Amino acid sequence: MFKATRSSVLILLTFVFTASYSQNRTIDSLKTILGHKISDTTRINTIIAAMDHSVTWSPPHVALYKQLQPIFTKGLKLPNLHAKTKQKYLYAAGVYYYNTAKKETMDRDDNAPLHFDEAIKFFKASKDYKTMTEAIVGKGSYFQTIADWPNTFKCYFAALKYFESIHSEFGISDVNMEIGTACLAQQDWEKGILYLKKALTYFEVPDADLSIGDRHDKSVILNNIGVAYTRLKNYAEAHKNFLRAYGYIKQNHDPKAESIVLVQLANATNDLGNFAEAQEYVKQSLALCEEDASRMAVYGSAARIYYRNKNYDKAAEFGEICYTLSKKLKNKGSMTGMSTLLSKIYRESGQYEKALAMYETSVALKDSTKLEASKNELAQQQLKYDFEKKELQQKIIQEKKVAAIQLDAEKKSFLETSKNKLARQQLRYNFERKAFQQKLMQGKKVSVIKLDAQKKNAAKNNWLIALSGLLLLLLLGGFFYYRNNKQKQSIAVLEKNQIKQKLLITQMNPHFIFNSIENIRSLIYDHQNDAAVNYLGKFSTLTRQILENSNENYIALNEEVDMIENYLTIQQLLYHNKFNFKVFVEETIDTESIFLPPMLTQPFIENAIKHGLSNTTENGKIDIRFYLKEAKLFFEVIDNGKGFDSGKTISNHKSLAMTITKERLVGYTKNQDFVVQTDNITDQSEKIVGAKVLFEIPYIYEN
């Protein structure tokens, strides 16, 4: 039997515990056997035995399973194979593809599912259903690494059902461990603890009876339970489980695994208020790290510990290192968590620009909708699993009852036969004596038979009608169920889009608000009270317009123009009147009858001021124009600034607000190829004297 490694991961730590034990002498002796001339089936047995004694995914282990491919490829082509020999070749093929897929899972290779399917196919053909189920678990582990939760739980619950049917305690524990870990990855902490504790029952034996692999698995489970208790803020239980996990893994002399548990123990110790002891655990963990993934986890934990103790300099230092390693490893989960933490660190230490940059990064990385959908998928799989399990139990009970009834009937029949043997002899005699009379009654019997046949035909017709009606009901029910689901999905998509639009149009730059208030306050300090009151009124009006329009999907064009003018007036104040502006609306446009989505133009106007006029100190110009062309409404903004850099478009320096606006325009127009036209304005000598941005605005005409 080959070594089936578990795929369970620690939440927020995206690497797998590796076993550090090996039997070098055994491997050397097995390699010596492989060097001699032996049969292919013996060679297969020898290779698999050597794999069981090698460190998983070490170069010798990989080299061993790769030797299987030419053996089973040649063997399965041989004619007239004996059944047992063919079964051995099929099993070897399954082992090869299973190990290939597991290695690809570690490397995040997209070919892993295909090779898991090959392994499942060959194990099934070799009638090794238990190992086939382990391959199904491995396939679920791959889907878990890419956060494909529907396929993850589909694989896990299929495996759980099989292991329960054969009463495999280890298999049940293994799958419960995988399900619990997946729950933690979805932040469903309580359900994660439930499944992990189910997995832990298999290992509740005297410590002396635990193998190295058992200690490794038990440490993983305890560590993950500790993580869940930490997220539930039950720090005492978390510390207790981390401490137990460290006690088991330390016996295995596995630096990587030991480092992971020390990180969690440091966090739990700090949560209990012992900062000095937590620092010591961090130092021990960092000393054991041998690759970037481990260092990323340790630096991330160190950043959190220093942040909670308000040592912002150290927290920022370790956090930046962790974030850099996360980007290098393309670990999106760690990048999201660390960017959020760094935003808090910089904000609380007064570094507002860095805080805003990190906050925007964390917003872009989050995907809460997908997370919620995956939780629902787990609940559905659980309900389906419970239902099928109950149905199977009821079927078994019913079959037992039927068997008992049949047995009782056979016993009674036997006793009755024995008691009435004499009577049966008498009946036989009477039958022979009355043979003549029975011939006379034959005509009546024929009539009775015909009547019975008619009754049977009628019963068949009744059954046919009933089944046809049932089939019709099922088809109608399926049709209405499908239509109802489609309607619900359409409503859900519409509501989601409406919510998204409302979220998108509530974006307001905090620097703009802060700077506006600061400039108004400066006017007050300079005793320019009339100007201060004027600008404060416009700022108040603009703020009220934005808040009111955030609840509307469409507003009138005259309201949008009014909001733009207020916005530009305040921007003039912020930029010390270095530019003038004009807003033109074509005379043929009825501004009260044309409705358009609010705040679509603001990001492009802001870009023209901020970037287009960045080199201008006076006499800047911003011209804004709304016009109709072929029944389409167009927006145009022109500045007399430096223009766009050669070979670049506006997307090279656009703000988050502009990105959001482009998403809104694509959402309104349903056109994924929507383009914002950007051009430089040149004079007769081809010198750039400004820039122009033009795009179509979706609108509604209300007469």
Image (spheres, rainbow, N blue to C red):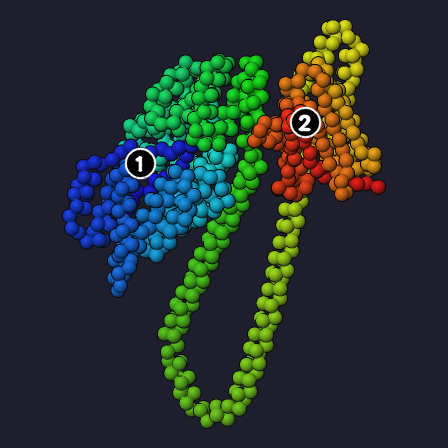
In this view of the protein, can residue 133 be seen by the observer?
A: no
Q: Which residue is mark 2?
A: 683
- What whole-number distance in Å separates the C-alpha atoms at marks 1 and 2? 77 Å
Between label 1 and label 2, give the one nearer the viewer.
Answer: 2
Residue at left 40%, top 68%?
410
Q: Nearer the viewer, residue 167 or 469?
A: 469
Circle on res. 700: none
Above or below — where is 280 with respect to 158? above
Q: Position of residue 605 (x, y in %)?
A: 69, 26
Badge 2 amino acid: Asp
Residue furthest out toward the front: 685
Q: Nearer the viewer, residue 530 or 143?
A: 530
Residue 47 horizontal side relative to residue 611, left or right: left
Residue at left 50%, top 93%?
440
Give the quadrant of residue 412: bottom left
Badge 1: how crowded within 10 Å, few (<14), some, or many (20+)? some
Above or below — where is 133 with respect to 347? below
Q: Position of residue 69 (x, y in %)?
A: 29, 50
Badge 2: how crowded within 10 Å, few (<14), some, or many (20+)? few
Q: Earlier in the sequence, mark 1 or mark 2?
A: 1
Q: Which residue is mark 1?
A: 213
Residue 187 horizontal side relative to residue 425, left or right: right
Residue at left 56%, top 22%?
357
